[in-house]
Image (spheres, rainbow, N blue to C red):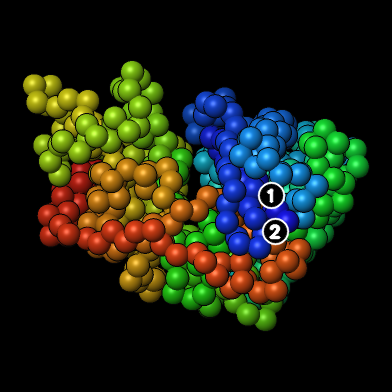
Amino acid sequence: MYLLGIDIGTSFIKVSLVEASTQKCILTVSYPDTENAIISHQNGWAEQSPLMWWEQVQAGILKLHKAAKLALPSYNSNDIAAIGIAYQMHGLVIVDKNKKVLRDSIIWCDSRAVPYGEKAFDAIGHKKCLSHLLNSLGNFTAAKLAWVKENELALFAQIYKIMLPGDFIAMRLTGKITTSISALSEGIFWDFKNNCISKEVLNYFGFEQRIFPEVQDVFSNHGALSASIAPALFLKPGIPISYKAGDQPNNALSLNVLEPGEVAATAGTSGVIYGVGNTLSYDMQSRVNSFAHVNHTSTENRIGMLLCINGTGILNSWVKKYIGASTNYTTMNEMAATIAAGSDGLSILPFGNGAERIFNNKIIGAQMLGIDLNKHSAAHIYKAAQEGIAFAFRYGLDIMRENKLTPSVIKAGQANLFLSPVFTHAFVNATGVPVDLYNVEGSVGAALGAGIGAGIYKELKEAFADTKPIERIEPTETKLYDALYENWKDKLAKFI
């Protein structure tokens, strides 16, 4: 018996096949072969087409079948028992009564809605927002929808349902539209005190309750694979979509980060540290955000405190594309490793992907500082980029420490920037926290989540019985990196 996991990333779609009895990943494929573009009609805007995601999900599933047949002569797609979905958080998808997409999705790193969120924060009241929503409205999904209402009123009037990206893919697979408390909280729609969609948010923005999908548990049946879709995907009709979660709560799930005090990190297009608590806690400035974790319930709080830095892996990708175009990430990392810590005075601020919450939603842009044209090479840029990303994590982690989150160890998947020894070394030394690396993927977590939601695993612990780290990286040069970080932070201060 197999479980299928789908991860709708910004850059790629990933699909994994997991053997349910052993919780082991059989294989993972990604699609397409090159990174997806972000549509930016204006400075600070960021959109992607939901229909592109849907086409790529289908292509990814077919690619997985082909690879599975080569790897497993006995493979039969009829043995897939459940499907789970992870997705890029905060994106706004809107459809009409025929379930037709009305516009491209305004995705997580889009900054246009910041003024709408700030006005709502002031109008509803800071104390009310923080105590009930656990956040300001910032540029999250609710504020994005407010932008559509004001600027595209005719289109807004056609809205039948609003969704997060994972809700949309589940709808295309099943025809059913559902959501969860976790999803609504990431959109800043959920009132934690009253355990319902926030009446204050609805009333302030003029949103009708009818546009929200049915609310279900994260681990539940969100619909069955429809007979009209199944044949094209070489899957049997009726497979339940039994789990949906945003990529960061899902990453935490995949690392078995479920209980208070446990902390996970990712360093993909954006960078995230995600810690679990059991109180309705929040940062007074909303520089870090609090959302319902996958195992949050109305009777047992499980709140994920999320530090998000928009500009992390996207900087490394930009450097490769425009400075290291003739090389690859492995060679870039090898070249960076030849440069001493501190990059001979070259500093990079990685914040070139929209408004950053850690700076109260300011857009400061990516900056390359202290270039010496006679000394610095491409290798210095590769090193300074990864160090700058690590220092950005330290800056954000210090905010989390102000909010009483003090991890003794951070769990991370050995993927994206954590594949780089240069970055991982800089991360642990800049933060002063050891990192346990795991061989996990977001799509694997989604598959295991599907097993939980379908009742194949009777409790969460059963799905992660054999989840163990492959390596622990300990800090070794914290004094040096403390000094380098203070120098980097001094340069940052000129921009914030």
Residue 328, position in %: x, y? 35, 27
* Drawn side of residue 197 relative to residue 369, left or right: right
Q: For the residue marked with disc 2, what is the amino acid? A: Ala
Q: How crowded is mark 1: few (under 14 residues within 10 Å), some or many (20 or more)?
A: many
Q: How many marks do you count on the picture?
A: 2
Kindly indicate the quadrant of the structure image that contains residue 216.
bottom right
Of helix, strand and loop, which one carries label 2? helix
Residue 349, position as x, y percentages in the image: 29, 40
Residue that mark 1 sits on = 4
- In the picture shown, does residue 244 fall above or below 70? below
- Quadrant holding the N terminus: bottom right
Residue 64 makes an appearance in the image: no
Disc marking residue 95: none
Which residue sits at x=14%, y=27%? 376
Q: Counting residues from the N terminus, which is met first, the one under dot 2 or under dot 1?
A: 1
Q: Is residue 224 visible?
A: yes
Near-viewer residue (116 or 43) = 43
Between 433 and 468, the one nearer to me in the picture = 468
Report the residue at 34% width, 59% height from top: 471
Give the Cα separation between the discs numbered 2 and 1.
8 Å
Which structural element holds mark 1?
A: strand
Residue topped by disc 2: 450
| Few, some or many residues within 10 Å of mark 2 (<14, 14–19, 20+) | many
Q: Which residue is drawn at 39% across and 71% down?
A: 405
User: Residue 62: image x %, image y %?
Assistant: 71, 33
Q: Residue at x 29, y 41 (%)?
A: 386
Residue type at tag 1: Leu
Pointer 2 and pointer 1: residues touching (CB < 8 Å)? yes
- Give x and y (percent) for residue 67: 63, 35
